[in-house]
Image (cartoon, rainbow, N blue to C red):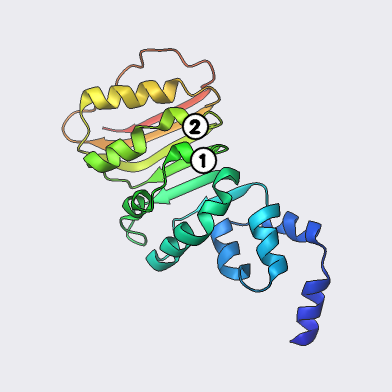
Amino acid sequence: MTTNKMILESLSNELFIELFELFDVVDLFRSFYGLNTRFNSLLLIQVRDCRVDCRSIFKEDFNRFCRIYLPFIINRTIYLRLSDNEEAPYQCAHFQSAGFTFGQFDNLRYLTLENVSSDPKINQFFFSDLYYLHNLTHLKFIGCRLLGISLGDFQGVIDQIWNLPKLTHCYFDFCFRGRSHFCIPTSVSTSLQYLTILGN
C-alpha cells in the first residue's frame, strides 16, 4: 500500500489535471477531495473545465457536493446535467433550495435537464434566467413534464432560448398538459444550427 501511495504521489500535477478533466467532477471530489492538500488544491484551483453530471448521485452526496464543492467551481463549470429521475428524485428542487441559479454559471456551455416536472417555483427558477447563459452552446430538455406552465410563459422561455448568442444545438423533449405549448419564436436565432423537437 505504501508503494502504491508513493507512486501516486510521484505523478506530476500536470498529469493529474489532464486526467481529472476526463472525469465528472462529482466523482473526482468524492474520490480525491480530502486525501491531502495537494489534491484539494488541484481540484479547487487548477482544474479548469468542470463537468457536473448529477444523474446517478445519491441525495446525501448531491447535497454535500452543492454545499461544499460547487461554490468553488461554479465559474469553471462548462457542463451541467440535472435529473429528476427515480435514482435522484427532486434533484432540481434541491439544487434550487441550495441557492443556485443558472445565471451563476458564467462559463456553462452544455446544460441538460432530464425528467424535470414543472411547478410554479421550478418554472420561475429554471426559466427566468436562461438569458444569462451567454456561453451556452448545447441545451437539452429530456423527458420534461411541463404540466404547470402557461402558453404565455412558455413563449417567454422559447424567446429567451432563441436569443442565446452562442446556442448551436437545442433538443426539446417536452410533455404538456393537453395540447402542445410549443410556439414560434418571436425572433430569429443567429447561431442555432441543430434543433430537435419531440413530445406532444
Question: Looking at the image, which residue is at 49% across and 32% down?
Answer: 133
Question: Looking at the image, which residue is at 23% across and 22% down?
Answer: 152
Instruction: Indicate left or right for 5 with 159 as reference.
Output: right
**Mark 2 is on which residue type?**
Leu
Instruction: Indicate left or right for 187 with 26 as reference.
Output: left
Q: Residue furthest top?
A: 187
Q: Look at the image and tell me whether residue 118 can be seen.
A: no
2 and 1 marks in contact (CB < 8 Å): yes
Residue position marked by numbered label 1 in the rendering: 105
Q: Residues within 10 Å of mark 2 (few under 14, many from 20)?
A: many
| Residue 93 placement (x, y as % from top left) | 31, 51
**Mark 1 is on which residue type?**
Phe
Q: Residue furthest bottom?
A: 1
The N terminus - image quarter: bottom right
Question: Looking at the image, which residue is at 33% across and 47% down?
Answer: 115
Along the line of sight, the residue nearer the viewer: 12 or 23 = 12
Q: Residues within 10 Å of mark 1 (few under 14, many from 20)?
A: many
| Residue 112 placement (x, y as % from top left) | 45, 42
Along the line of sight, the residue nearer the viewer: 51 or 142 = 51
Determine whether the residue tagged by mark 2 lies in a helix, strand or loop: loop
Residue position marked by numbered label 2 in the rendering: 133
Quadrant of res 122: top left
Q: Look at the image and tell me whether residue 113 can be seen.
A: yes
Question: Looking at the image, which residue is at 45% across and 66% down?
Answer: 61
Instruction: Indicate left or right for 39 with 79 as reference.
Output: right
| Residue 94 placement (x, y as % from top left) | 34, 55
The C terminus - image quarter: top left
- Between the C-alphas of marks 2 and 1, the distance is 7 Å
Quick check: 82 above or below 176? below
Determine whether the residue tagged by mark 1 lies in a helix, strand or loop: loop
